[in-house]
Amino acid sequence: MKRFFSGKYVVLILTLSINVISTFGQEKLKITGLYGKCQSGYFACEQLEIKSDSTFEYGIFYDVGGWKIWTGNWSLSNDTLILNTFKQPQTESDSITLSLANGYFFYTDFLTDLKMRWKGNKMYTWDSQNKEISRKRFLKKTNIGDKEFKIYKKY
């Protein structure tokens, strides 16, 4: 037992611990930014901003309805991004959803464990029809200056 706690082993354990912590920090920095770019004269648009403080802003625009925006916290588990809004359902009836015309997403006032897959500069979104992360539909990382929606803080 005494030998296990010798200087070499302590240094090795500390080095491995620091590497694990710094690797997560680097991944966190790589994932931050804006995903999704609205085309000129758009009638529909989807954008997701991942912030370094583990919060997000997620906006979907449809011509008739305007912007629907969610804010909350995100976490990363391997290559899976998990979004949770600050507002969560209070009762089962609050979790009733309205289907959008495109069938890819369901409008709600909250997001609970919405999963997306992060691969480099692409964020693969949830496919509600197949109840899985899409293999085809993704938001591509873009310049933060291309963000189209704004969050206005209420005081």
Image (spheres, rainbow, N blue to C red):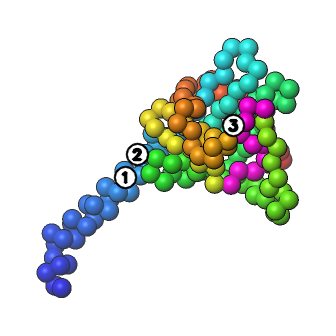
Q: Are marks 1 and 2 in contact (CB under 8 Å)?
A: yes
Considering every residue shown, the one lying at the far top of the view is 40
Locate the N terminus and report the quarter of the image it occupies: bottom left
Question: Residue at position x 22%, y 71% from top?
Answer: 10
From this view, report whether residue 73 is shown above or below residue 62.
below
From this view, report whether residue 3 is shown above or below residue 114.
below
Q: Which residue is mark 3?
A: 104
Question: Residue at position x 20%, y 78% from top?
Answer: 5
- Pick the front one: 6 or 70: 70
Q: Quadrant of residue 46?
A: top right
Graded by Cα atoms within 10 Å as few (under 14), some (14 to 19) or many (20 or more), the crowding at tag 3 reads some
- Could you say where residue 41 lies in the image, as x and y percent from the top left? 73, 14
Q: Which residue is mark 2?
A: 26
Q: Which residue is mark 1?
A: 22
Instruction: Indicate left or right for 144 with 22 as reference.
Output: right
Q: Are marks 3 and 2 in contact (CB under 8 Å)?
A: no
From this view, report whether residue 110 is shown above or below residue 121.
below
Q: Is residue 107 magenta?
A: yes
Q: Is residue 46 magenta?
A: no
Q: Which residues are magenta?
A: 101-112
In the image, what residue type sits under mark 3?
Answer: Tyr
